[in-house]
Image (cartoon, rainbow, N blue to C red):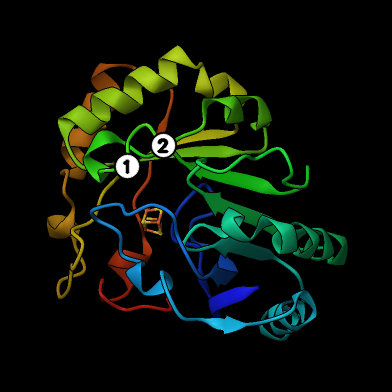
Amino acid sequence: MQITEIYKSLQGESSHAGLPCVFVRLTGCNLRCVWCDSEYTFKGGVRMTAEEIEREVQRLSPDGGLVEITGGEPLLQERELVPLMDRLLTTGYTVLLETSGERPLEAVPAGVIKIVDVKCPDSGEGNTFRLENLKALTPRDEVKFVVASRGDYEFARDFIRQHELSSRVANVILSPAFKKDAAGARDASHCLVDPQALAEWMLADRLKARLGLQIHKFIWEPSLKGV
Ligand code: SF4
């Protein structure tokens, strides 16, 4: 597998936010979201076998816990990734898979918690979510929308209602997009949508979803990688 980095930090998003987590970041992405903060994953990386990756995960987190498979788009390397996720589950890790939902999800092992980032229009990659993937979502999974405008919010709201997401998955999360090259202050000034406005829209619409903040951007300097 082509790997950009493996490191331990706190989980910054999803309902697991705040928990220690080993991140396995795979190289390569087939999308180009305008606010992407992971462009360094598009190229390069190092070749690692599943055994080498598992050994590094065990070194960083010998007592089990959370492992997040992320990217880039990890499912571009599905053939090798599925056996790796199976190995990590067998060893006793809780495995999260962050994906855009543009690639098929059927082959993802049942024990993996999928965190599906459905792209909103202002990402520049709207309409990339594969609707057939709705069938592969389980009550363990989470669906996330990164919101950069009121238009994005309305897209997310309508998608959640149309596909009854809150009854399909454990959590539906709306999260303000961060400015692409945010640096300096660790506060909400870098958000493309004011979290307060997003919260008020959600409350006004009685949306069955939770507001998520990328807490690592508030804990560490926002331009820092590997945290
Ligand atoms: S899917 Fe993720 S890694 Fe790929 S361009 Fe979008 S934000 Fe960046």
Judged from this view, the residue extending furthest toward the top is: 162
Please report contact status of discs 2 and 1: CB closer than 8 Å, yes or no. Answer: yes
Tell me the amino acid under the disc marked 1: Glu
Q: Quadrant of the C terminus?
A: bottom left
User: Which of the numbered marks, if any, corresponds to residue 125?
Assistant: 1
Instruction: Say which residue appears at 53% left-offset and 35% top-offset.
Output: 171
Which image quarter: residue 153?
top left
Find residue 172 and report its horizontal and vertical position in percent. Answer: 47, 33
Find residue 111 and report its horizontal and vertical position in percent. Answer: 78, 47
Q: Is mark 2 within 8 Å of ligand 1?
A: no
Q: Which residue matches tag 2?
A: 128
* 106 left or right, relative to 2: right
Residue 207 visible (yes or no): no
Find residue 43 and report its horizontal and vertical position in percent. Answer: 42, 75
- Label 2: state its secondary structure: loop
Q: CA distance from mark 2 to mark 1?
A: 6 Å
Q: Quadrant of the N terminus?
A: bottom right
Q: Is mark 1 within 8 Å of ligand 1?
A: yes
Seen from the viewer's position, the closer of residues 211 and 153 is 153
